[in-house]
C-alpha cells in the first residue's frame, strides 16, 4: 500500500503530481491510501517506494478531465481522490473514457462536480458581511458554512467583487482575509468569532421586506433558491416567517400601494437584489458569461427599457447597452428627445449567451426556459421601480414581459396593459437596425418615432 498525504482537503496540485507519478508506475487505485495532512504534502509517504523520476515519459489528459478534477477535489466525499485516480487510469487506456455519459464512475464524478459548483454559487449568493470597526478601520466580516471544501477556490470571486473593501470570511475549515491588496489565510473559526448583527443587517432586512411580494409567494421555490441551512446567517430570513404569516394582509395593502412607496429603502433594496443576482444560478447561463449584467438607471425612472441579453461588450463591462447596439440606441434616443440618463435600462436575460468561434464570442439567442428563469430578476426590478411605461426592445423582451411569444409587428406603436401595472410598449431591438439591409434609414426613422411617442406618453402620464 502506498500512502499519499496531501497538504489540505482541496490540494489539487498535490493530488495531480502524485496521481501522475503513480499512474506512470502503473499503481492500481486499490493500492493507494489518500490522506490529508495539516498543510504539508508528503506525496509518497514514509515507507512508500520512491516516485518515478521527474523526467519520465510525458503524460497528458484531456482538458475536461482537469476541469472535472479541479471541482471534484473540493467535494467532501473522502473517496474523491481515489475515484478521480481510477478515472485517470482509465483515461490513459481510453482517452475518450470521459465521453461515456452512461458510465457510473463518470456520472458519479460529474454529479460531485455539480454539487461543488452549486455550493460555490450558494456561497456567492449567501455570504452576508457584518461591519466591524477596530482601531479606526472598518472591516466586513462574514461567517459561512460551506458544504464542500470550496473556500480557497472561491476566494477570487470575493476579491474581484469586493476589491476595495477590507473583508474576512470565517468558516469552520479555514478563514480568508483581504486587505485591498493581499489575500491571506488563517485557521478555522467558530461561529462566535464572527460578529452578530449590525447596520448591514438592517439593509438586508429592508431589502427583503421591500421586495417580498406576497402575491407571488411560492414557499417551495423560495426554499430551493435559498436553502434553509443558510438561513441562520442571513439577517433577512429572520423576517420570512413573519412575512409569510402576514402575506394576505400585505397582499391586500399592496393592491393599494402606489408608485414610490418603497421610498427611501428603494436604493438599498435595489442594491441588495442586484447583489443577489450576481450569484444567480437559476439557469445554466451563469456558466457562460463573465458576470450577471443587471439593469441600471434611476429608481424613479418613468420608462424602463428591456433588451434581450447583454452582448460581448456588456458582458465584459457589466453594464447594459454599451456595445454597438447600445450606441445606436443612444443615438436614436437622442434623436427622439429622450434622455437615456432618466430611464432605467435592463435586459430580459442577464447573462451573455454565446458560441465560441475561434477567439470570437458570437451572440446566441436565449431560449424560452432561459427567458423564464430570468423573469424572476426582471420582476424584482419592476417591483422596485414600478415604471409607468415599460418598453420591450424586440421579441425576447416582449416574451419576457407578456409571458408568451408575441409578434412585434402586431403590437408596435400602442400601449398594452401589463398584469403587474403600468403600460407596455413594443418596438424593434436596436441590433435589428444594425443587421437590416433594405430600408435601413426608414427603419431607423420608425424606431425614433416609436421612442418619441413613448417619450411623449411618459410626459403625459407624469
Ligand atoms: N443587446 C441587448 O439586448 N442588450 C444589451 O445590453 C446589449 C445588446
Image (tube, helix red, strand yellow):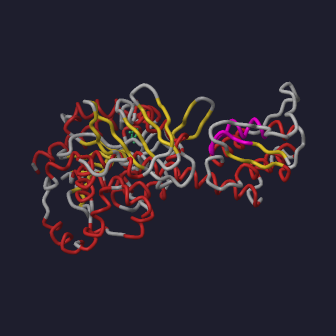
Across and down, in percent, residue 214 comes to: 26, 68
Report the magenta residues as a range.
Answer: 5-19
Vertical side of 237 occupied by 63: above or below: above
User: What residue is shown at x 53% (from left), y 43% (from top)?
Assistant: 288
Position of 402 with respect to 2 (left or right) is left
The total number of labels drawn is: 0
Query: Foreground residue, 247 or 343?
Result: 247
Q: Is residue 393 visible?
A: no
Report if residue 328 lies within the magenta region.
Answer: no
Across and down, in percent, residue 242 comes to: 25, 69
Residue found at the far right of this picture: 26
Across and down, in percent, residue 142 comes to: 38, 46
Position of 89 with respect to 411 (left or right) is right
Across and down, in percent, residue 326 comes to: 35, 33
Residue found at the far front of this picture: 46
Q: Quadrant of ligand 1?
A: top left
User: What residue is shown at x 39% (from left), y 31% (from top)?
Assistant: 163
Q: Quadrant of residue 114?
A: bottom right
Report if residue 8 lies within the magenta region.
Answer: yes
Query: Foreground residue, 211 or 432?
Result: 211
Position of 172 with respect to 136 (left or right) is right
Query: Foreground residue, 171 or 430?
Result: 171
Position of 81 with respect to 243 (left or right) is right
Amino acid at each position: 500500500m502506498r500512502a499519499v498525504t496531501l497538504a489540505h482537503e482541496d490540494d489539487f496540485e498535490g493530488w495531480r503530481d502524485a496521481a501522475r507519478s503513480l499512474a506512470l508506475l502503473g499503481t492500481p487505485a486499490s493500492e493507494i491510501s489518500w490522506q490529508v495532512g495539516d498543510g504539508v504534502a508528503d506525496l509518497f509517504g514514509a515507507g512508500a517506494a520512491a516516485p518515478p523520476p521527474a523526467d519520465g515519459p510525458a503524460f497528458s489528459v484531456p482538458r475536461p478531465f482537469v476541469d472535472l478534477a479541479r471541482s471534484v477535489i473540493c467535494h467532501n466525499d473522502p473517496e474523491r481522490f481515489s475515484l478521480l485516480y481510477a478515472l485517470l487510469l482509465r483515461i490513459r487506456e481510453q482517452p475518450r473514457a470521459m465521453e461515456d455519459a452512461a458510465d457510473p464512475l463518470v456520472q458519479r464524478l460529474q454529479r460531485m462536480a455539480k454539487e461543488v459548483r452549486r455550493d460555490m454559487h450558494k456561497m456567492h449568493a449567501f455570504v452576508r458581511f457584518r461591519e466591524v470597526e477596530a482601531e479606526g478601520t472598518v472591516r466586513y466580516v462574514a461567517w459561512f458554512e460551506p458544504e464542500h471544501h470550496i473556500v480557497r477556490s472561491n476566494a477570487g470571486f470575493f476579491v474581484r467583487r469586493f476589491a476595495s473593501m477590507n473583508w474576512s470570511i470565517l468558516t469552520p475549515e479555514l478563514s480568508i482575509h483581504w486587505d485591498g491588496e493581499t489575500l491571506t489565510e488563517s485557521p478555522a473559526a467558530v461561529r462566535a468569532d464572527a460578529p452578530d448583527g449590525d447596520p448591514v443587517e438592517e439593509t438586508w432586512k429592508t431589502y427583503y421586506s421591500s421586495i417580498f411580494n406576497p402575491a407571488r409567494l411560492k414557499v417551495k421555490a423560495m426554499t430551493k433558491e435559498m436553502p434553509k441551512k443558510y438561513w441562520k446567517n442571513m439577517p433577512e430570513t429572520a423576517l420570512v416567517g413573519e412575512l409569510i404569516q402576514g402575506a394576505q394582509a400585505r397582499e391586500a395593502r399592496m393592491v393599494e400601494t402606489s408608485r414610490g412607496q418603497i421610498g427611501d429603502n428603494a436604493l438599498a433594496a435595489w442594491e441588495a437584489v442586484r447583489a443577489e443576482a450576481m450569484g444567480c444560478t437559476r439557469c445554466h447561463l451563469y456558466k457562460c458569461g463573465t458576470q450577471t449584467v443587471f439593469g441600471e438607471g434611476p429608481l424613479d425612472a418613468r420608462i424602463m427599457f428591456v433588451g434581450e441579453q447583454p452582448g460581448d461588450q456588456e458582458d465584459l463591462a457589466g453594464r447594459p447597452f454599451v456595445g454597438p447596439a447600445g450606441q445606436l440606441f443612444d443615438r436614436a434616443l437622442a434623436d427622439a428627445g429622450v434622455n437615456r440618463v432618466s430611464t432605467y435600462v435592463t435586459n430580459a436575460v442577464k447573462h451573455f449567451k454565446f458560441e465560441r468561434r475561434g477567439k470570437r464570442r458570437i451572440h446566441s439567442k436565449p431560449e424560452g426556459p432561459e427567458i423564464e428563469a430570468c423573469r424572476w430578476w426582471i420582476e424584482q426590478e419592476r417591483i422596485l421601480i414600478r415604471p409607468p411605461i415599460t418598453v420591450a426592445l424586440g421579441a425576447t423582451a416582449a416574451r419576457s414581459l407578456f409571458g408568451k411569444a408575441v409578434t412585434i409587428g402586431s403590437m408596435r406603436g400602442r400601449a398594452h396593459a401589463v398584469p403587474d401595472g403600468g403600460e407596455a410598449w413594443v418596438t424593434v431591438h436596436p441590433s435589428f437596425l444594425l443587421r437590416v439591409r433594405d430600408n435601413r434609414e426608414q427603419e431607423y426613422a420608425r424606431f425614433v418615432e416609436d421612442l418619441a411617442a413613448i417619450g411623449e406618453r411618459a410626459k403625459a402620464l407624469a
